[in-house]
């Protein structure tokens, strides 16, 4: 009796903390404040259209090479504070929110992760024979040393930039983020991730040493002040999400070959603060609005690096992003922010003039604070994102006729890289949330399995008898039980998300949840191959089809149908085997590697992805990056190349012609 009672108490204790974790995590949803769209519209546009184009775009030569000055002098802190060690013992990198529940910071050599990686320049230069290629350093450089007085003379001194009553006033928005550096930085070699640096004093300066300290709550701020605050808060969220996505560095002792996420850190920071994540969505739509306003100039801009093929690829991606069909399908987010509301208050002109001057002054002060980040990589990414925000504000506040002449290369590069960072961060919210629940489920199901099995053995047989409709792993396989629980958790999450988005009726939602909660074999098989394959939409389609709810006459069906063809799949799932062949696969043509290699031309272009062979011949002229982008991976297994820049959902429109033998 004591054993039974203790087991039940342990199970209840674990369930209590599981539901506390659920309460902790509140993903952002609903209407965005100070914008005319909701979170769901932003995430849909980002997932279906924007993210994959932006991710590919920032990897082109033009957008991955950046000239930005990183050796500015800090004017806000003394030597001891501003030059704090990079490998800080505090776990909350570049954040003002510390939490005793965060995972301890992994050890790192002092300064090792903060230093910029300039890469192998000889290797970089070998990609092009053009001596003026951005990727090729020029030898015997002219000495570009200039004095402080000379440097200040290069800054915009036009009187019009000091007069809020004239349109030119916004031309120098980015003045305090100079880009006149003699060296370039390869952003692809310096990704944004955990470095060990604690920048809480920097964020304190940004939030507290400017006008926001006296303003109090958001409700007490005027519209313009709220906009600037939300932009900075969104940038803060993006930085923290990137750190959480790549937090634990590779380690032989920990058996980590790649950077791994820290979802617990993310949940501790944002689980109960969804309003901060909504500021990230707000900042994203402000950038998109600026992109739309500058689109006539950007569409015809010459993105020249010296590599004709790469330049053509870049131009194609830009035009694809700015294409009217993309903007029209995402119109709600491109038009969500209305810049005409800025500085449009009634009253004395002097009030508007004063607000403009103070507002721009605050942005300049914040730009200067970036020089107080002692971690070089953190300073790089902070400056890039603030430059991206400043560029967007300049585009939105200047008259249209001044936009073309006002934008510099570094500002364009920063704008698109900031867009891509925010886009990745928005997707990272769901990634980290799913990871957190997956880890929690794995841990707690291990504890619950043992305690519940013990209590059930004392009670006798379960009320629900075992049948072919349940997937029961071997009693000794705790890992398999955990995997099944994690799979059910992810599948229920997919159903909940689809229901929230209005993609499922209540009837379908209820039947899918019932099937998953009773461990229906077909439901788990579909989840195993589609949820784990990052093809959530296909999982829902096949699940609904198997419920026979597509036909209203079959609405009385309450469970999945199990057929003879499920047997091998069920056995594979029980044994924990991957890659079992589906019934559809066995009916398709088996194509050898030699045969596949013979189809790598414009006349016949076959590509293998996840062991399935697709004929992309008809799609060659339609690809946004041109036919060369597909031909480069034709005639071979291109799974890794494909998923480096695309998602599984993109394949849903293509039917495979066979499977790779």
Image (cartoon, rainbow, N blue to C red):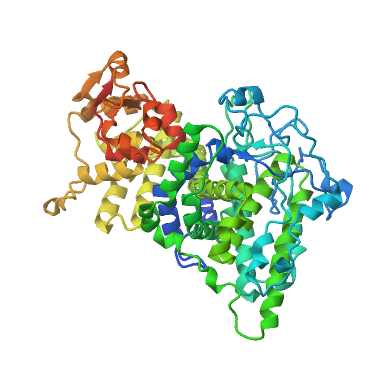
The answer to whether 157 appears left or right of 550 in the picture is: right
Q: Position of residue 297 (x, y in %)?
A: 50, 54
Q: Which residue, as the protein is rendered here, is positioned at the far bottom? A: 347
Q: Is residue 216 visible?
A: no
In front here: 615 or 569? 615
Image height of 633 relative to 376, above or below? above
Q: Which residue, as the protein is rendered here, is positioned at the far right? A: 79
In front here: 465 or 39? 39
Q: Which residue, as the protein is rendered here, is positioned at the far left? A: 553
Q: Quadrant of the C terminus?
A: top left
Q: Position of residue 407 (x, y in %)?
A: 60, 54
Q: Which residue, as the protein is rendered here, is positioned at the far top? A: 594
Q: Residue at x 37, y 37 (%)?
A: 648
Q: Is residue 110 visible?
A: yes
Image height of 457 relative to 554, above or below? above
Total residue callouts: 0
The answer to whether 370 appears left or right of 254 in the picture is: right
In which quadrant of the rendered view does residue 637 lie?
top left
Q: Position of residue 72 (x, y in %)?
A: 79, 47
In front here: 51 or 12? 51
The answer to whether 351 appears left or right of 550 in the picture is: right
Q: Residue at x 69, y 81 (%)?
A: 351
Image height of 27 relative to 646, above or below? below
Q: Position of residue 232 (x, y in %)?
A: 64, 58
């Amino acid at each position: 009796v004591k054993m039974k009672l203790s087991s039940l108490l342990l199970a209840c204790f674990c369930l209590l903390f599981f539901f506390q974790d659920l309460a902790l995590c509140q993903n952002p949803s609903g209407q965005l404040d100070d914008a005319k769209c909701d979170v769901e519209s932003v995430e849909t546009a980002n997932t279906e259209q924007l993210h994959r184009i932006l991710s590919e775009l920032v990897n082109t030569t033009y957008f991955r090479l950046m000239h930005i000055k990183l050796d500015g002098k800090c004017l806000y802190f003394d030597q001891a504070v501003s030059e704090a060690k990079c490998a800080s013992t505090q776990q909350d990198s570049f954040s003002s929110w510390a939490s005793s529940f965060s995972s301890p910071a992994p050890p790192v050599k002092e300064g090792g992760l903060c230093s910029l990686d300039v890469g192998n320049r000889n290797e970089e230069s070998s990609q092009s024979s053009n001596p003026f290629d951005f990727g090729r350093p020029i030898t015997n450089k002219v000495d570009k040393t200039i004095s402080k007085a000379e440097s200040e003379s290069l800054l915009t001194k036009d009187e019009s930039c000091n007069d809020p009553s004239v349109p030119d006033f916004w031309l120098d928005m980015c003045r305090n983020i100079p880009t006149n550096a003699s060296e370039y930085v390869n952003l692809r070699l310096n990704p944004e991730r955990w470095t060990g640096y604690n920048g809480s004093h920097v964020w304190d300066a940004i939030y507290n040493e400017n006008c926001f300290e006296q303003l109090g709550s958001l409700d007490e701020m005027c519209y313009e002040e709220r906009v600037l605050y939300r932009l900075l808060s969104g940038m803060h969220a993006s930085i923290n999400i990137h750190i959480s996505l790549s937090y634990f560095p590779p380690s032989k002792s920990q058996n980590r070959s790649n950077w791994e996420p820290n979802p617990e850190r993310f949940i501790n920071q944002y689980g109960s603060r969804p309003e901060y994540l909504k500021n990230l969505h707000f900042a994203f739509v402000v950038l998109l609005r600026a992109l739309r306003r500058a689109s006539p100039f950007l569409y015809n801009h010459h993105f020249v690096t010296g590599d004709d093929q790469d330049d053509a690829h870049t131009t194609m991606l830009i035009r694809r992003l700015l294409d009217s069909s993309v903007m029209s399908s995402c119109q709600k987010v491109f038009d969500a922010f209305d810049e005409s509301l800025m500085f449009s208050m009634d009253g004395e002109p002097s009030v508007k003039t004063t607000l403009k001057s103070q507002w721009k002054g605050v942005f300049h002060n914040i730009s200067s604070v970036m020089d107080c980040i002692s971690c070089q990589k953190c300073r790089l990414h902070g400056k890039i994102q603030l430059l991206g925000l400043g560029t967007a504000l300049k585009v939105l506040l200047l008259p249209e006729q001044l936009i073309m002449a006002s934008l510099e290369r570094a500002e364009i590069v920063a704008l698109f890289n900031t867009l891509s960072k925010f886009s990745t961060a928005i997707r990272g919210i769901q990634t980290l949330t799913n990871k957190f629940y997956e880890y929690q489920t794995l841990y707690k199901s291990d504890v619950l399995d043992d305690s519940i099995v013990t209590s059930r053995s004392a009670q006798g047989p379960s009320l629900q008898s075992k049948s072919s409709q349940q997937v029961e792993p071997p009693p000794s396989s705790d890992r398999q039980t955990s995997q099944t629980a994690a799979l059910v958790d992810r599948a229920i999450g997919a159903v909940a998300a689809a229901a929230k988005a209005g993609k499922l009726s209540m009837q379908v939602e209820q039947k899918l949840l019932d099937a998953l909660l009773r461990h229906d074999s077909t439901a788990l098989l579909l989840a195993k191959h589609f949820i784990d394959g990052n093809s959530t939409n296909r999982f829902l389609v096949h699940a609904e089809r198997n419920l026979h709810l597509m036909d209203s006459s079959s609405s009385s069906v309450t469970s999945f149908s199990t057929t003879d063809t499920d047997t091998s799949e069920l056995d594979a799932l029980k044994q924990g085997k991957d890659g079992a062949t589906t019934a559809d696969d066995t009916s398709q043509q088996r194509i050898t590697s030699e045969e596949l290699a013979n189809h790598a031309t414009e006349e016949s272009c076959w590509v293998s992805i996840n062991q399935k062979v697709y004929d992309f011949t008809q799609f060659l002229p339609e690809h946004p990056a041109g036919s060369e982008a597909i031909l480069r991976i034709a005639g071979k297994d291109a799974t890794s190349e494909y998923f480096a820049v695309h998602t599984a959902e993109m394949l849903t429109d293509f039917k495979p012609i066979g499977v790779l033998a």
